[in-house]
Image: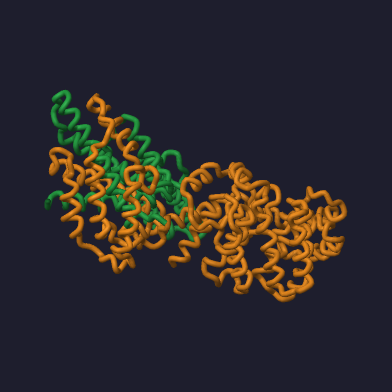
C-alpha cells in the first residue's frame, strides 16, 4: 500500500512536473507492465499506473518520484483547455526529452516480443537515433515495431501489444527512412482495427513529410477516425487514468491518449473529467489517512467538512498554546539552555531505536551543521536575517519602533551549546506517516 | 524526503522558533531600554509567539509546498491576522443538518411517490437523485471555499492542488502543535 501510494504520487509527479528526466525508472515500469499479461480489470491499481506512467513518461520524460508541489500547483493552474500544453514545451526541449524514452521503450518492446529480426531493426534504428530527425526516427521505430506487432498479435499479449501497436502505428507514416518496408507495414496496419488509439498516432503524425506512407496512413486514419477519435483526450492532457492505457508518442501536440473503459462515455470532456475526479478522490484518500477519524467517511462533502474542522482545531490549538507560552513567559526570553538541557531531553515518546535512528548518528549531523547554523541552516531560508526582517516588519507595525540590527553574540554561543544536547534526544518521535512523502 | 514528522523538520522548526523568539525578545529589550515603552501585553506576546511559530514552520518546510511562501508573505507585510469568525462552524453544522434533512425529505418523497406508479417512479427517483447530487455539489463548493480561506495561499490554487496543499499543511500543523506543546511543557516545568 505504501509503495502503491508512493507510486501513485510518483505518477502524479510525472504528470505534473513535466520536466525531462531519466527514462530508466519508467522503462522498468513499462517492462513490468509489458511482461504482465493479466487483463486490466483483474490487476490492482499498479499496472494501470505503470501503463499510464510509461505512457506519460513519453509525454514528459520524467520519472522523478519526488513531487514538487510548487510545480504541481503551477501545472494544475495552467491546466485546462490546452493550457496544459503551454508549460510542457517549456519543459521539454522540442520533445527531445522523450527521445530516449521512445527508443528505450521500443527496444524493450522488441525484446519483449522476442523477435531477433525486429530487435535488430530496432537496434539499427536506435543506432541511427542520434543522427536522424525526430519524425523519421519514430517512424523507423514504429515501422520495425510494426513488424513485431504483426506477429505478436497472434500471441494475444494484451498489454504489450496495444502499446506497441500504438507506437508502431505512430511511426508508420514516415517509415521510409527505415527502408521502405514500412509501406508494407502500413498496409498490414490497416488490417488491425482493434486498436482505436492508433488513429491518434496517425492523426498526429500525418503532417510527416513522407508522401507514400502518409497517403497510406491518411486512408488508414480516416478509416479509423470515426471509431476512435472520441477516445483521444487532447486538451487537458492528463497523464493518469485508472485502467486507462496511454501511449508514449507525443510528437507534436503532446497529447495523452486514454483508452476509455468499457461502457463509459468517451468524450474528451468526460474523459478529462473522469481523470480529474480520480485525482481528487485520490487526494481525498490521502487526506483520509491524515485526518484522524475519517476512515469510514465517504463522499467529498463530508470529508471536506472533516478536514475543515480538523484544520480549524489545529489552528486553534496553536493559538491556545502560544497564549499559554505568552502567559508563562513574561519576557519572551525562553530560557533556552534550561529548556533544552532538562525538559526536552526527558520528553516521552517512541524511542529512537524504533525509528532506526540513533543519537550517535544525529551527533555528527548536528556538529556538521553547527558552523553553518548562523549562516543559514539546511533549508536556506532559516536565516537570522529573515527572522529579523520579518519580526521587524511585524513588531514595528504594532509598536512603531526599529529593531536592533545585530543578534547577541551570546546567542550563538548558547545555540551552539544547546545543539549538542539536541542531538542526544529525539525531538521528532513519530515515524513518518505512510503515504506522505514529500 | 522531509516529511513533517521527521526529526530534521522538527529540529529545524525548533531552531527557527528559537531564532525568531530571540529576535523578538531583543526587540523587546531594545524598545524598553530606549524609550521605556511598556512591556508587551499578553496579546502582543501571544501574537509574537504565534507568528514566530508560523514563520518557523514555514521556513523549516523548505521548498516543497506553496503555503510557506504565503505564510511568509503575509507575515512580512504588516497586516494583522484576523481571527476566524465564529459563525463558520455554525454554518457548516447547518449545512450538514440541511443536507441530512434534504436527503431525508427526498427519501420519504421518493418512497411516497413510489407507491403511485412504477413507470414514473424511475424518473422521479432520477430527479431526486439529481437534486441531491446538485446539493452535494453545492456543499462541496461551499466547503472548498472555506478550505481555501483557511489554508494559506489557497486562494490561487485549483481543487486538486488545494487538496494537496491541505494534506501538506495539515501534517505540518500537527507537527507545529506538537513542538509548541513540548515547549510549553518544558517552560512550565522549568
Image location (x, y in percent) of residue B102: 36, 50
User: Which is more toward the observer, B106 or A379?
Assistant: A379
Classify A329 as above or below A231. above
Image location (x, y in percent) of residue A315: 27, 45
Q: Which chain is orange?
A: A
User: Which is more toward the observer, A221 or A23?
Assistant: A23
How many circles with numbers are drawn on the protein?
0
Could you tell me which residue is drawn at 32 percent across and 65 percent down? A357
Image location (x, y in percent) of residue A189: 79, 63
Instruction: Note whether residue A96 is visible.
Output: yes
Classify A387 as above or below A336. above
Dividing the picture into quadrants, the one containing residue A132 is bottom right
Could you tell me which residue is drawn at 86 percent across and 51 percent down? A211
Image location (x, y in percent) of residue A260: 62, 59
Horizontal side of residue A257 vs A305, given as left or right? right
Classify A151 as above or below A376. below
Dividing the picture into quadrants, the one containing residue B33 is top left
Q: Which chain is green?
A: B
User: Which is more toward the observer, B185 or A207?
Assistant: B185
Amino acid at each position: 500500500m505504501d509503495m502503491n501510494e508512493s507510486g501513485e504520487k510518483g505518477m502524479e509527479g510525472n504528470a505534473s512536473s513535466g520536466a525531462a528526466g531519466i527514462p530508466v525508472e519508467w522503462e522498468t515500469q513499462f517492462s513490468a507492465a509489458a511482461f504482465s499479461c493479466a487483463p486490466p480489470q483483474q490487476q490492482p491499481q499498479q499496472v494501470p499506473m505503470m501503463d499510464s506512467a510509461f505512457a506519460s513518461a513519453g509525454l514528459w520524460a520524467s520519472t522523478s518520484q519526488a513531487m514538487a508541489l510548487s510545480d504541481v500547483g503551477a501545472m494544475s493552474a495552467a491546466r485546462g483547455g490546452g493550457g496544459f500544453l503551454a508549460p510542457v514545451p517549456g519543459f521539454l526541449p522540442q520533445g527531445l526529452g522523450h527521445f530516449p524514452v521512445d527508443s528505450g521503450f521500443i527496444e524493450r518492446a522488441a525484446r519483449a516480443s522476442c523477435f531477433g529480426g525486429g530487435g535488430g531493426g530496432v537496434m539499427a534504428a536506435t543506432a541511427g537515433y542520434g543522427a536522424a530527425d525526430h519524425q523519421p526516427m519514430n517512424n523507423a521505430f514504429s515501422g520495425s515495431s510494426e513488424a513485431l506487432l504483426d506477429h505478436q498479435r497472434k500471441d494475444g499479449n494484451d498489454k504489450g501489444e496495444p502499446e506497441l501497436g500504438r507506437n508502431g502505428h505512430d511511426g508508420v507514416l514516415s517509415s521510409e527512412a527505415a527502408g521502405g518496408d514500412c509501406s508494407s507495414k502500413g498496409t498490414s496496419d490497416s488490417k488491425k482495427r482493434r486498436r482505436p488509439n492508433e488513429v491518434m498516432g496517425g492523426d498526429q503524425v500525418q503532417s510527416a513529410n513522407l508522401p507514400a506512407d502518409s497517403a497510406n496512413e491518411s486512408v488508414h486514419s480516416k478509416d479509423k477516425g470515426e471509431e476512435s477519435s472520441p477516445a483521444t483526450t487532447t486538451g487537458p492532457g492528463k497523464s493518469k487514468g485508472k485502467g486507462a492505457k496511454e501511449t508514449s508518442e507525443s510528437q507534436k501536440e503532446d497529447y495523452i491518449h486514454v483508452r476509455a473503459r468499457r461502457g463509459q462515455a468517451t468524450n474528451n470532456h468526460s474523459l478529462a473529467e473522469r481523470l480529474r475526479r480520480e485525482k481528487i478522490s485520490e487526494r481525498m484518500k490521502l487526506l483520509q489517512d491524515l485526518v484522524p477519524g475519517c476512515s469510514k467517511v465517504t463522499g467529498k462533502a463530508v470529508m471536506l467538512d472533516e478536514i475543515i474542522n480538523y484544520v480549524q482545531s489545529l489552528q486553534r490549538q496553536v493559538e491556545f498554546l502560544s497564549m499559554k507560552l505568552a502567559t508563562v513567559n513574561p519576557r519572551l526570553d525562553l530560557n533556552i539552555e534550561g529548556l533544552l538541557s532538562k525538559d526536552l531531553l526527558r520528553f516521552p515518546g517512541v524511542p529512537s531505536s524504533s525509528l532506526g535512528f540513533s543519537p550517535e548518528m544525529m551527533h555528527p549531523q548536528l556538529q556538521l551543521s553547527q558552523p553553518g547554523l548562523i549562516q543559514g541552516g539546511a533549508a536556506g531560508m532559516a536565516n537570522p536575517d529573515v527572522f529579523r526582517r520579518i519580526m521587524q516588519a511585524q513588531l514595528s507595525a504594532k509598536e512603531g519602533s526599529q529593531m536592533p540590527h545585530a543578534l547577541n553574540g551570546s546567542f550563538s554561543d548558547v545555540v551552539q551549546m544547546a545543539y549538542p544536547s539536541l542531538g542526544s534526544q529525539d525531538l521528532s518521535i513519530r515515524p513518518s506517516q505512510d503515504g506522505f512523502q514529500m | 524526503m522531509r516529511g513533517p514528522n521527521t526529526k530534521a523538520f522538527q529540529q529545524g522548526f525548533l531552531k527557527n522558533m528559537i531564532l525568531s523568539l530571540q529576535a523578538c525578545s531583543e526587540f523587546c529589550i531594545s524598545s524598553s531600554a530606549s524609550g521605556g515603552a511598556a512591556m508587551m501585553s499578553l496579546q502582543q506576546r501571544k501574537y509574537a509567539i504565534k507568528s514566530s511559530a508560523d514563520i518557523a514552520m514555514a521556513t523549516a518546510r523548505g521548498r516543497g509546498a506553496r503555503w510557506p511562501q504565503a505564510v511568509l508573505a503575509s507575515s512580512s507585510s504588516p497586516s494583522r491576522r484576523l481571527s476566524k469568525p465564529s459563525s463558520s462552524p455554525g454554518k457548516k453544522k447547518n449545512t450538514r443538518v440541511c443536507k441530512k434533512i434534504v436527503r431525508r425529505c427526498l427519501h420519504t418523497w421518493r418512497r411516497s411517490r413510489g407507491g403511485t406508479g412504477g413507470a414514473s417512479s424511475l424518473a422521479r427517483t432520477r430527479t431526486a437523485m439529481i437534486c441531491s447530487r446538485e446539493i452535494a455539489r453545492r456543499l462541496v463548493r461551499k466547503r472548498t471555499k472555506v478550505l481555501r480561506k483557511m489554508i494559506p495561499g489557497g486562494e490561487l490554487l485549483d481543487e486538486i492542488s488545494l487538496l494537496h496543499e491541505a494534506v501538506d499543511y495539515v501534517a505540518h500543523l500537527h507537527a507545529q502543535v506538537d513542538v509548541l506543546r513540548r515547549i510549553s511543557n518544558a517552560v512550565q516545568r522549568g
